[in-house]
Amino acid sequence: MTTAPTARKGAVGTARTRVEGRDKVTGAARYAAEIPFAGLAHGWLVLSTVARGRIRSLETAEVLAMPGVLAVLHHGNAPRLNTDYIGLLGVPPDPTCTVFQHDRVPFVGWPVALVVAETPEQAREAAEALVVRYEEEPYDIAFTADRPDAYPVGGRMPAVTGKGDLAAGLAASAVVVDAQYTTPEEYHHPMEPHAATARWDGGRLEVVDSNQGATWVVGELANLFSLDPASVRVRSEHVGGGFGSKGVRAHQVAAVMAATLLQRPVRVVLTRRQMFSLAGYRSPTIQRLRLGADTDGRLRALEHDSLSHTSTVHEFVEPSTGATRVMYDADAHHTANRVVRLDVPTPTWMRAPGEAPGSFALEAALDELAEKCGIDPIELRVRNEPERGPVSGLPFSTRNLIACFREGARRFGWADRDPRPGLRREGRWLLGTGTAAASFPVMAMPSTAAVTAEADGSFTVRISAADIGTGARTALTQVAADALEVAPDRVRVRIGDSDFGPAMIAGGSMGTRSWSWAITAAAGELRERLVPGAAVPPEGITVRSDTTEAVGALAQMERHSFGAQFAEVAVDVATGEVRVRRMLGVFAAGRIINPLTARGQFTGGMIWGISMALHEEAVRDRASGGHYGADLAAYHVATHADVPHIEADWIDDPDPHDPVGIKGIGEIGIVGAAAAVANAVWHATGVRHRSLPIRPDRVI
Ligand code: MOS
């Protein structure tokens, strides 16, 4: 059979159900903890019950005598790891993941042992029976605005930016907003808990895992165990959510240790409760905003200071002022991301890290400024549109923020809004509407892909991408089909296997963009190589691509997606309950590959914003250093009943410097969403709520 591509384009931009959707709803799709292995043993992690101190003893003899128990791994017998390296994301490994290397305990829920047994039940029973004695030390979990030990931290951006005289700018301003905003500890627990099975197979380490990037996990494991990356294979075909939490964690490392020691496959699954200390979370933030403006709303001075916390063992900063450096300019413009080290678990990237809490503070402060100036909140933003990046001075590749506001305002009915607060009443409900801006950086990272023309006329794409529930596999199928100029049903996209070569992780809203770039490059070259009418050999014809150079050649610009969020709320004057009645988000986020799954990405983020505004909050117990109720019964998240009417749409905004026009849509949906809800609560009640979540007891 010949494989001259039929001239057909048009998959990109059409709504398509997931190519693996049927497998997922019928149960045929298997997740990491469901894949069977012969001779499988099960590991159960034992976590510290004290917030700081030293392990004095582990009484392993009794536990080793229990039924089915094969081993107890701990700091006294575990293999030594190499932890002296910088990983794929540019940071050293978090010691929480490099398990059992010493006897120190830096927080409640720190991994102190792994009990391995024939069955998960035996492992769990033995793990719960293991007596661990500690030398306890005083601990400090006090996250307060006035910590003298807080310090600025960069990470993926400068820690501090500044220009102009802030004091002078504020003094010269006719209108000043000076307010503190706080957000609590928030957790990104995917539906599928973290799980990994490790085994040695013919001299290679194989890990079947649930992660956001096989390349990432291979790199970390190869470094930690001093292995040639080529001798490590990580597979992760279906992933039930990630949101930033699914990188290398304690369970993969513990599973590899145990599989090495026992020379049989070992599976370690985190429980929901264990995820609260081992899978990362969003740090609480305390943010101060100072805005100074003329009476016409034009900003003269802007200061945004954000404090977050991290553990004593690993430095992670929540970069909450990132969006402020892009959104609004002022002659005096100062931002800082600071951190304080406490005896708490290490936070990590959680959907729209920085932008999510930062946009709550920034966009709520803008709303307060609009009120003080007597200007419509959308008009205030129009008047403060910067020509160039306020901090970088670089031009924007595209900036369609105002177009999003205009389209959103039209659809939401914003023009009819009476700006005065506390006026609309419907029975026991006060009604209000609010808006906020959204933005998220647009980036791409090098990836490799292989595209094969098969002898039967079909095409196979191999890329170490991860579909963490976003629909990425389907989007990549559409992108490949268009690049090959064939119908999507002739294209099979295989992902989630590190043997396909290095590729970007599903993260930073740049997975689909980075992978599509590599697929487009390989597919384009393959199409040129295929001779119409010529037969394809049985092994097929394969073209590989590597986008390292192309991505590296991107000129420095301010590259972002933008959006406008709108919310209508009703506030119960008797109970203080806030109900969101409707929500609309309009985004300028590049070319949309699949409207069906893209809408799910946007509304998923927006619902998370409602959740952030009204529900989510993990509370630490000062008496133990741990949480009250570390489970999804105590940690409230928004459900269907909390979202009666939600719409997301977009305007035409192809990225001019991307081969497909993609920008990335994974995170922007949550940005600004909580502020839109909080601003609507003010409009309903006349009261500003600057601490999230806006619980009934805070409203009353
Ligand atoms: Mo995301 S927080 O970039 O997985």
Image: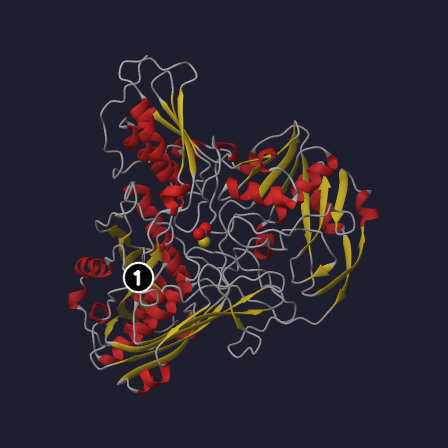
Task: Name the kind of residue labelled 1 in the image.
Answer: Leu
- Quarter of the image with the C terminus is bottom left
Q: Circle 1: is it few (<14), some (14-19), or many (20+) Cα within 10 Å?
A: some
Left or right placement of residue 82 versus residue 25 in this view: right
Q: Position of residue 91 (x, y in %)?
A: 55, 55
Along the line of sight, the residue nearer the viewer: 330 or 359: 330
Q: Quadrant of the N terminus?
A: top left
* Among the 4 quarters of the image, the one containing residue 376: bottom left
On the question of residue 689 being in view, the answer is no
- Left/right of residue 522 with respect to residue 32 in the rendered view: left
Residue for point 48% across, 52% down:
244
Q: Could you say whether the residue bearing mark 1 is in a helix, strand or loop?
A: loop
> Which of the 4 image quadrants contains residue 304?
bottom left
Q: Nearer the viewer, residue 17 or 497?
A: 497
Residue tagged 1: 394
**In this view, 450 is above or below 410:** above
Question: CB at mark 1 closer than 8 A to ligand 1?
Answer: no
- Residue 569, position as x, y percentages in the image: 30, 65
